[in-house]
Amino acid sequence: MLGYTITQWLFGTLSFLAIMFALMMVFTRSPVNSALYLIMTFFCIAGHYLLLNAQFLAIVQIVVYAGAIMVLFLYIIMLMNLNADEEPRKHVVTRAIAGIIGGMLLFVMVGALRGAEQLQTVQGGASQIGLVKNLGKVLFSEFLFPFEIASVLLLAALVGAIMIGKRDTNINSKETINN
Amino acid sequence: MTAFIIYKAIMCAGVFLLCLGAAAYATLWERKFAAFLQDRKGPSRAGWGGILQPLADGVKMFMKEEIIPNVSNRALFILGPCLFMVTAVITSSVVPWAKPVNIGGVVYDMQITDINIGVIYLLGVASIGVYGIMIGGWASNNKFALLGAVRASSQMISYEIPMGIALIALIISSGGSLSLKTIVEAQDAGVANIVWQPLGFLIFFICALAETNRAPFDLPECETELVGGYHTEYSSMKLGLFLFAEYINMFISSAVIATLYFGGYNFPFAHELYAKLGLADGSVWITLIGFGALITKVFGFVCLFMWIRWTLPRFRYDQLMNLGWKTLLPLALFNLLLTVVIEYFRGNIHF
């Protein structure tokens, strides 16, 4: 079809959708719609992983990001009951400054990407590293140390979250006694 | 290529119709079963012994007036039940329904697709299944619906974790493959996974009850506290989709449990029976007998789901959370540890 393979068509469609949903996530005013567009973006990125033959990454992307983290995001947004019309309108000067800074960032990005055609492209589909077995073997041999460090980091974050979230019953009871 | 597409299309349509038909008659069976447990007769007017009751229910649902609340978010309000139905149905695509059949020298798998991450796919679909309820509940713009949606999401996230850990233990003891086809074939050659994973099965079953929002885990639609829960504002077929999807979920969860822990389409002394009947591998009859065996197991689990619903009272919310985080999660971790030790002494894993 028009000189492109099916993979290229899929890549083009997925990229278009991913960028479109990402833009809509930024531009929409309702926080819930924003979160839903972000979920759609995650699904598109999972599709890209599938094109790269990394099924495990694709499904983990869906389970972890779309299935767990974004559910909690939505949960908070829904409970806080944020509405589009309650969002404060920003001042014209603030908007102008944001626009100029964003434009300059875009300029830098375009400049940086000008040399991108010299980069080596990875051939999608040929690599078998994304399959569960190969990924597991690499993670537990070659990259064992960073893998374990990452798990310790996650554990530390978990303990921190529990410490912040935990209501300290002793302090509360003391306060009530003093009052 | 054309033959392949036709075969896949037939498989998809067949599995889809199977799920819908089974779910429709599960609604009738649930009412009959409840009537039996409560010493009543149950629906008996439509057709012989009430056999046409699901049809009558469906017509009633379609004919009801459809009300969309003025202050709701219209698009999301409609999206909610659709999403819930879609996620309920797509789980069925990785379940192997019967043994491969050999027609004219070509072997056809009785499974829509055999992806090599099948088990994680099940978890993924379970984790996005909550969006239908959340979006529907929020878009209704109703306090009770929102509370129901919030309860549903926290319940599903909490019970996914022990479910995932129970699945890890299962994968370790069944040979390390994530593909459901391979898991079933391993049970055909050896014994059913329930023999090595009794505790894992119990954890998985309780989590499946919680994921399908069935009693005693039906907190999201608890009438005494939340009117109708997340579907308070829904009427007509949109309500029908929510209720119907629950039965599809129940049917497919039962199929998944039967596949993972009870050998799927295999049954004891199957090979002896096939040899006695003189059936060769790939015969249509073997496929049909295997399918019958799977459906019998699924029917058994559906009955168990219903029996539990009509026997146990609903949990309180704090009891639900305590069961999930303080009982099932440590139990699942203990089961994982136990599995690794046992498999090490069985010689299936090496360090």
Image (spheres, coloured by chain):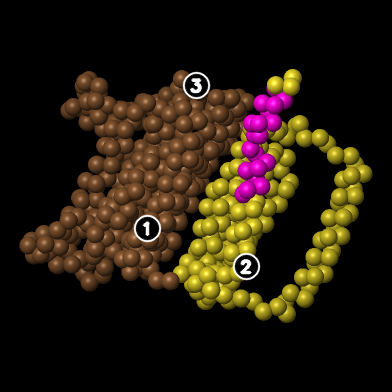
Magenta run includes residue B239: no
Q: Position of residue B183 (x, y in %)?
A: 33, 61
Looking at the rendered structure, which numbered label has been put on residue A146? 2
Q: Residue under label 1, please give it.
A: B339
Specify start and end residues of the magenta stretch as a single range: A158-176
Q: Which chain is brown?
A: B
Cβ atoms under marks 1 and 2 closer than 8 Å: no
To the question of a shared chain for discs 2 and 3, the answer is: no
Q: Residue type at mark 2: give it.
A: Pro
- Circle 3 sits in a helix, a strand or a loop, which is it? helix
Alpha carbon of mark 3 to alpha carbon of mark 1: how far?
41 Å
Number of marks present in the image shown = 3
- Circle 1 sits in a helix, a strand or a loop, which is it? helix
Alpha carbon of mark 1 to alpha carbon of mark 2: how far?
27 Å
Magenta run includes residue A171: yes
Q: Residue type at mark 3: give it.
A: Glu
Q: Position of residue B58 (x, y in %)?
A: 35, 31
Q: Residue under label 3, please give it.
A: B225
Q: Nearer the viewer, mark 3 or mark 1?
A: 1
Q: Nearer the viewer, mark 1 or mark 2?
A: 1
Cβ atoms under marks 3 and 1 closer than 8 Å: no
